[in-house]
Image (cartoon, rainbow, N blue to C red):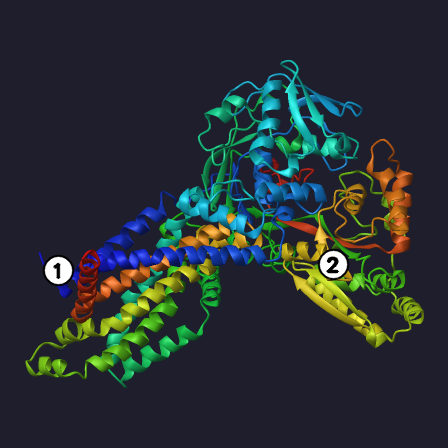
Amino acid sequence: MKLTRRDFLKVSLGGAVSLSASMLLAGCGSGGSEKQTGHTKIKVGVSGDPKSLAPYALGNDARKMICFHIYQAAMHLLKAGDTPIPAICESYEMDMDGATVTVKLRDGIHDHDGNPFTASDLAYSYNTTKEVANSASYDYFTEVKAIDEKTAVIYYNPTDIVKRNNVESALAQGGVYMFTQAAWEASEDAMVATPVGTGPYRVSSFSVGAKVILEKVEDFWQAEAGYEVPRDYQANFDEIEISVITEVSQIAIALETGDIDASANVSEQDITLFQEGGEHADDFKVVKNEGFLGYFMTFNAHTELGGNINIRKAICHAVDLDGMINTLAKGEAVRMNAPYGTASSAGDYDPKWDEREYFPFSMDTAKEYLDKYLAESGKKAEDVVVKFAVQNNANCPKPAEILQAKLLELGIGVDMKVYDPATFNTILTEEDSYDFTMYCMGWNGVVNAWQLNDSSNYYYHFDKESAMYQELLSYTEPCMSRVTWTQEATEKLWQYVYDNAWVRGLYKNYDNIVVPKWVNEVVINFNRNCMYGSFVHD
Amino acid sequence: MINYIIKRLLTLIPVVIAVAIVIFTIMYFVPGDPAKNILGQDATEEQLQRERELLGLADPYFVQLGKFLYQLFIKLNPGTSWLSGFPVMTELRVRIPRTLLLSFLTMALGVAVGIPLGVTAAVNQNKLPDKLCMIGSMTFISIPDFWLALEAVILFGLRLHWLPTFGMSSWKCWILPVVCGSLPGIASNARQTRSAMLEVIRSDYVATAKAKGLAPGAIKYKHALPNALIPLITMMGGHLARCLGGSMILENIFSMPGMGMYLTTGITQRDYPVVRSVVVILAIVFGVVMVLVDIVYAFVDPRIKAIYENQTFNLAFWRKRKDA
């Protein structure tokens, strides 16, 4: 049969129409808008794609939030810096000499499929996570062995176990979630889309990159066994529908249109719509929560300008922190008089630092320090150009511009470059590429902050043989070990860092969580994740 | 003809390999440490180094390139995402149909509306319909589609509550992305069709058709349009490529989890297996589309078919000579 040009056009057109129709039908799937029934369900918008719900994967805040609903860790923290409370395990005991942590399991533990959870499952969870994730994140332990049905021993790397906070955070952070060997072996997708955990919610539907629906576990083991369920593991909704909305401005629109009920990812610009006096204040409220990310400036010891104390102090005093906070966060941010904030999970934050004078903004003082540098170096102010590397995120570039203006006002040049976060990480490793930086980071505390200095050393580029570095170590080392740590040691480190102006803490933002008026209480866990399922509501 | 198609498909192989090498090389030199992205800022240098070794980043350039090409083209396995641990192929299997559907619908709407508009404008040259079509086309060509998409979200989602603004849970979710994505295509198709039709409707055979007393509709769609299609088909190939590229913006604006969203998060997080795989797959799709466009030429224009057949003959002749 010969296919004519006209036949071909007809066939093509028909084919195109039917293909469009069939693809459209196929692509639409079985979705459809669902009716909300009472307040047994909460619809949540997240900006990050959780990608995988497997217990071994690392990931973003959205994934962590979902995993905290599905899984439990060995121990639990109510808030950062607290002593761990029982979760899967009743207690833990450290033997720093033997570099081991012995954990005792609670009774009546079972997973969502009803498989009983024993010490060998705990060991299996740890060892499988380490093996499958194949990531240096799990280098802190070598292996875990079950001693009997209720007891297991975690073998730590000796240098890690003495580091403050490493044991507690590792037991509770969720880096290793608990699952049973039986469930793991039965899983066809390594629990990526069909996880079987031990937490108060299970996954009822997972559409990659689009939606996750969690449903309440009716026979949650902790409640069944008669244990008191911590408030962030209480399942107060029958269902949580989590939609991935990558475009942040769309989150506010989704709230306004009723497609979602709550979100912790509303932009600063849109948040006013939901605050008192805002267009949607009748239906929503905004709950503020001190954020996990802190904003800082650090100096590069390797360069002439970054390594000069007078330049460092001149820059630190030229920071108009009130101006920055007003411009960026409408005056609502937590000042950080330390290279870390109150959310420090190491528990070494001292509230009295809040009262202290901390690099007060003064152009006169900044000028004095600059003049000292000019006098000792014999340079003119116009010959001084500082290289300023800025991390490109929602909050750094604007304050950086304010600081740039102040430094120009001092009479020195500023070569400011803004880098995307991944590039910024590389820039920090190049010892000549910047004099000082501005960035944000989720600090765990002074110990971890200065531990960097000891190990990767990539922020400051100290010469490890120098007397200056050895002096710094003499302050940091006592703080890093749980054997030698005291609050006084931390205090001395704070003073040393302040006197030498190696780091200038700036501020922490508040996380704004928009919730409907019918939510009475918002629950945030120790890791700063919204535990939507535990929200108390009408 | 079959020989020609096979030959064209075979030429795709070096093109795809070249794309793979180029994207690998670009990602190799792009600043940003994936190990630091995975482990976070407070990882020690020892941990970072170990992570780099685990990811194969500590190997020399040619070793990494060899492993990548072997994995991709011999084992047909692009590996797993460094950040999620999820196999890239599994994720692509879910995401590719969504992106292709979005691109195909966008292009189909562009063709279905743009071509009749262009024909109408051409047959009514310098009259009101022509002017309206051309003003509309210029407007939609000039407006960036991402801006149009954001405005459409505010109007149809927020103000009028007619359409959902994100996701893909129902057929309604596809309306805004498809319409917003197709408007520039409609505009350029209309302009291109108008100009092609203007050339054709002045041809002798159209004058003959008119003289024979054929109906205007028959002259337009049976005689003139097929002859005006050649430049349009060329443009449609490029249009589909543009739709695939443009879908990345649309997917991000409308939170549609397709390849575009996967690629953009892969780039920002330096998830190399994801970026490399998506780019190579896009290259394959573009290549296949271009081959299809060439094949379609043959069916639309007998002259081109004759050239292809001649090439086929030459190929057969060359083989015979070689055998001899």
| Residue A388 in sight in this render | yes
Question: The numbered mark 2 sits on a residue in which chain?
Answer: A
Q: Which quarter shows the N terminus of chain A?
A: bottom left
Q: Is residue B260 above or below residue A41?
A: below
To which chain does the residue with label 1 belong?
Answer: A
Task: Please state the horizontal and vertical placement of residue B113, each as a whole percent of the image.
Answer: 29, 68
Where is residue A79? Give x, y as percent.
73, 36
Q: Residue at x 20, y 56 (%)?
A: B323
Marks 1 and 2 share the same chain:
yes
Q: Secondary structure at mark 2?
A: strand
Residue hosting label 1:
A3
Q: Is residue A50 left or right of residue A423?
A: left
Q: Position of residue A497 (x, y in %)?
A: 87, 51
Can you tell which of label 1 and label 2 is closer to the viewer? 1
Quick check: can you spot residue B102? no
Please give the residue where the numbered disc 2 appears in the rendered image: A438
Mark 2 closeness class: few <14, some 14–19, many ≥20 residues within 10 Å: many
* Lateral position of residue A48 relative to residue B206, left or right: right
Label 1, secondary structure: give it: loop
- Quadrant (top left, top right, bottom left, bottom right) of the C terminus of chain A: top right
